[in-house]
Image (cartoon, rainbow, N blue to C red):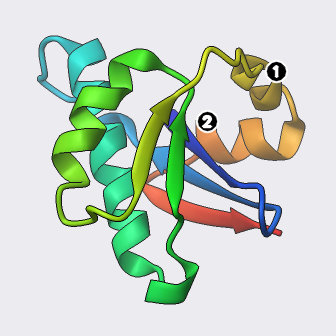
Amino acid sequence: NGAIFIFNPRTGQLYLKVIHTSVWAGQKRLSQLAKWKTAEEVAALVRSLPMEEQPKQIIVTRKGLLDPLEVHMLDFPNITLRASELQLPFQSAMRIEKLGDMILKATEPKMVLFQ
């Protein structure tokens, strides 16, 4: 299983999207697929938010994610996309027992919101 961390600094909310291994079954070029899947999930989250809660900008911590995200965010011309060199310790976050267990023991893809 894998996970996408989406953090909203304005509200302090952490969206954790768990990607089940079934998504990757039989696929080749997994690193490229992961980038496109991440961009798709971010766009889906933005779409699900009410207009007034949609972000003004999205900061991407992996430069390779910028191009796929630009493609998926074409419906949102008012949202600016920026790359950052900030190295956040996502692997360390997986060591938090609650998060690690949720990701590893997931039996299906799911979105979890932490306040």
Position of residue 112 relative to residue 3, above or below, is below
Against 102, residue 15 (above or below) is below
Mark 1 against mark 2, which lies toward the viewer? 1
Q: Is residue 62 left or right of residue 84?
A: left
Q: Is residue 50 visible?
A: no
Q: Amino acid at mark 1?
A: Ser
**Residue displayed at 25% across by 54% down:** 73
Q: Name the residue at 53% across, 87% down.
A: 52
Q: Give percent across and percent down for residue 76.
A: 28, 65
Of residue 43 and residue 98, the one placed in the foreground of this image is 43
Task: Say which residue appears at 23% left-offset and 34% top-offset.
Answer: 68
* Residue 12: image location, x then y, percent: 82, 62
Q: Position of residue 63 (x, y in %)?
A: 42, 17
> Where the C terminus falls, by quadrant?
bottom right
Which residue position is annotated with label 2? Answer: 104
Vertical order, 6 against 77 (above or below): above
**Residue that badge 1 annotates:** 92
Q: What is the three-letter code of the residue carrying label 2? A: Leu
